[in-house]
Amino acid sequence: MAEPIVITLGQLAPRALPVYRTAFSMEQHFLVHFGIAVSALRVIHFMAQVLHETVALTRALENLRYSAQRLPKVWPQRFLPRGPLDPARYANDEVRLANAVYGGRLGNDLPGDGYLYRGRGLLQLTGKDSYAQATATLRTGYPSAPDFVADPDAVLSARWCLGAAAAIWIAKGCNEAADEDDIVEITRRINGGTVGLAERRRWLVRTRAVWGG
C-alpha cells in the first residue's frame, strides 16, 4: 500500500490562520482515516475546495456582510428586483441576513438557526443538517468527536476542524467524484451549486502542480 500523502501548505496559504496551521501539522490522520490522503487526485481536489472556501486558509467563519447592491447578485431569487426581500433591510446585518437566507431550510428549523449554523471551517459547513452529517460520519471512526450541532464552534477548533472537513467530504461522496477528476460534481456536493467554480478551477491548477494527479 502506498504511503499516505502528507500535505504541506507552503506557498499555497502563506497567511493561513494559526488554527489551520496547527490542524495541518497535527491532525492529518483524519485524511488518512477517511481515504483522502491515499490518492493524489483526492488530495488536489480536497485542497482546491478548502483553499477556495477559506480564501487560502484566512477565513474561519462565513462573511455575511454584504452591501445592498451586492445582495441581489448573491441571492437573486430572494432580493429585489426578482425576489421579495428589500436588500436595504439586510445590508451589513449578518444575523438578519443569515436567518433570512438559511432559515427554514438545510435542517434549520428553529428561530436563529440560520445564523447559528452559518458557514464554518475548512469546507464552510452550512445548515444544521450538514453539522449533524459531519458529526455522524466523524464518529464512525472517532467516537469521542464533539456533537457539532450542540457545539457548532467545535468545527473551528484545531483538534476537530480537519476532521469535520474530512467527514463532510466523505458524507457527500466527494472521494468518488475526485476519483473521476470531476470538479463540477465536487463543487455541487460541497456548495449545493457551482458558485465560485472558476476560482475553484484555478486552485485546482495550483494544487495539481504541488501534488500531481
Image (spheres, rainbow, N blue to C red):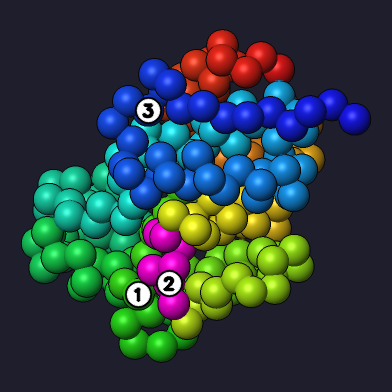
**Label whose residue precedes the other's in the sequence (1 or 3):** 3
Front position in the image: 130 or 159? 159
Residue located farthest toward the top when viewing the structure as drawn: 209
Which residue matches tag 2? 152
Secondary structure of the residue carrying tag 2 is helix
Circle 1/circle 2 CB separation < 8 Å: yes
Range of magenta residues = 151-157
**Label whose residue precedes the other's in the sequence (3 or 2):** 3
- Under mark 2, the amino acid is Pro
Question: What predominant SS class does the magenta segment belong to?
Answer: helix
Is residue 211 found left or right of 115 in the rendered image?
Answer: right
Label 1 or label 3, whichever lies nearer to me, is 3
Which residue matches tag 1? 116
Q: Can residue 116 be seen from the camera position used here?
A: yes
Report crowding for label 2: few under 14, some 14 to 19, many 20 or more residues within 10 A (C-alpha).
many
Label 1 or label 2, whichever lies nearer to me, is 2
User: Label 1 to label 3, Cα distance in Å?
Assistant: 28 Å
The residue drawn where x is 43% and y is 45% is 22
Where does the image place residue 23, in percent across and percent down from the top left? 48, 47
Where does the image place residue 56, in percent across and percent down from the top left? 37, 33
Q: Is residue 114 above or below residue 177?
A: below
Report crowding for label 1: few under 14, some 14 to 19, many 20 or more residues within 10 A (C-alpha).
many
Q: Is residue 169 above or below residue 97?
A: above
Which residue matches tag 3? 13
